[in-house]
Amino acid sequence: MAKIIVDGKEHECEEGQNLFQAIKAAKGRPLPHFCYHPALPVAGVCRMCQVEIEGVPRPVIACNAQVKDGMEVRTETDRIADVVQQILNFHLLHHPVDCPVCDQAGECALQDQYMNYGLYEASVDVEDKIHKDKVKPIGELVMLDAERCVLCARCTRFTSEITKTHEMGIFNRGNHAEIDVAPGRTLDNNYSLNTVDLCPVGALTSRDFRFKRRVWWLENTPSVCAGCATGCNMTIDHSEGTVYRCRPRPNVEVNSYWMCDEGRLLYHRLHDEDRLRTPVVAAEEGPRTVDWDEAYARVQSLLTADGGETRRVAVIASAHATVEELHALGRFADGIGAAKIGYRLEGSEMGEADDLLVSADRTPNAEGARRLGWSQFLGEELRAQASSDTVLLVLKNDFAAFDENGVDLLSAYAGVVVLGTHQDATMDLADVGLPVLSYAESDGLFVNEKGRAQELHASIAGPESARHAVVVLAELGRLLGKEFGWEDPAALRRDLVATEAGWGALATGIDRTGVLLDVVSDGAAIGAESGSEGGGE
Amino acid sequence: MAYSVHGPKAVSGGAGARLRRGEAFYLVEIVRGMAITMRHLLYNMFHSSTMPTLEYPDERPEHGPWLRGRHRLMKREDGSPRCVACQMCATICPADCISILAQDDDRPDVEKSPESFEINLLRCVYCGMCVEACPCDAIRMDTGIFELAADSREAFIVDREFLLNNTTDGVNR
């Protein structure tokens, strides 16, 4: 341990620690900065985080200094205020100040620093400013405005140190220095939108989010990406029932500060045309929209055999469902004596892993399903249960899209009831389709491939007549004369912790970084390939 | 009992005051009231130039340049809106009556422009904050139009073209 004195107050930190971080911890807020980022190597180019150190004659940038025991640091002297203001003046000298048309406005480091440390009269006329490339698409998803750049080199450090794809660089010198992609290259790696998050100003903006919504109108809901088994932490930015963008939320245990583009853009699916907004029943001319009462009446008639007795039920779970939904389905199946087929067809949703974050398993909760005792199913299990005396109940599983055998087998069942979010291939084959809330619209848990349980939070409300899958399961239970007694996912989580082994870690609550669950020793069936290494820190 | 239909005497008389016999009969009071009305009527008939009311709508009131009337959107030289859809007006608006959809603009000197710009005139409280907030002097409330009438609620939600065509001559279009 080392002791440093920051603005007259003693603070304990590690010897050799980065001085910028030590001061941030001591003061509770960071020094002004553009280039410093905890996950990138120190560049020391923006010169904003200058501090006075006792015994050193000139101001020193804190991000490139190390803590030494007994160090006395001053951050709020007149001299430092003057230095920071002068440096900021340099940064803004040729800045176009086009905040009205800039998407970064509202979350811009230049705006914040100017209000906190600047407030001087501009010394260059707008007419005298140097002009550079504006509105230049440098990749499928990223727009460059070189005039707004402060040359902090975060984007170039990201592409050279994290993705190691080296698309970006700083070209020319002095006033004419600007960032750009290397000649003949485009910024097209699967992590390109991280450069937009990293950019402290409006030089790099997202073409996906471009001009959609002003950032101060967005509400932020912490959640978890549903794109693959890595479970990157993210923030869902939404407003008035529409999701506008997803951004990574730092979690050094899972995704560091990053997230892949594929995962970020998944939110478009929430608002797709084929989103199931009302219950549907099969009719000769195609799916017909009905209200919930009529849909349940149809389920009731499917469940009743010609002789009047109740038919058997077989259920299919999904690695896209939350832990609570899977637990509800398990209890539902046990309660009515239904056959549990499993959670997916083996290999059906395996993609390719990369060496940064993306996992080969493109489902967010396969580990959770496995821990709840669900196994993967092959075509055989589906065939074994197929009979004209059995109704198939499917929860959030689009297996028909992956396996044509499954399609043929479905007609052998007395009826197919699907709880889903979209009018997908499986939903097309359903006798009754019931709209349920998606991962972005409900609270719940996903367990990532390393056994970390992470919380989702409801961001937007979802389609008006969609219901939470656990509520639908409780209502289906009532149709069969079973009262399960849960009303919401929270009740199911309490029940899960109380009744099932291996979920004890959730009992004490769960924080923003998730909870690592106990290792399950029984070695339940999990796919031959258990995904990639994941974790990019 | 600060206000009373009984007039000053009754007030000074307190709760127990009674009307005099003539007042209680009312007829005399009605005639006196009619006399005041007739006096004003006859005076105004012969002195119409000093009458304090206006022959509205044939005659229009004069107002100063500070009047905050119906909004208008300013144009560039080429006739397109000056507005860059920065949403400052929609952000500051206390009545939440402005809704703007932004679009990418293809012109080299214009990066962003409003695809749609709607003001709900029924919601507007005419505070003028949008005019203050605008960084481009794209919205003004100097048209002098203060009337607000239409035959449906939807007609009060005015669009970009309507606002661009408003001018300062005070004529309600």
Image (cartoon, coloured by chain):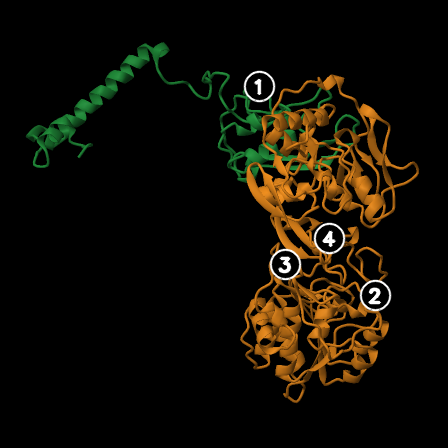
Q: Which residue is mark 1?
A: B168
A419 displayed left or right of B158: right
Query: Is A176 drawn above or below residue A380 in the view shown?
Result: above
Expressed as whole percent of the image width and height from the top left, the position of residue A27 reads 58, 41
Q: CA distance from mark 1 to mark 4?
A: 58 Å
Do the dots labelled 3 and 2 sit on one chain? yes
Identity, as a three-letter code, of the amino acid under mark 1: Thr
The chain assigned the colour green in the figure is B
- Tell me the element at label 1: loop
Q: Which residue is mark 4?
A: A256
- Tell me the element at label 4: loop
Identity, as a three-letter code, of the amino acid under mark 4: Ser
Expressed as whole percent of the image width and height from the top left, the position of residue B59 reads 45, 17
Q: Nearer the viewer, residue A241 or A225?
A: A225
Which shade is chain A? orange
The residue marked by circle 3 belongs to what chain?
A
Q: Which residue is mark 3?
A: A441
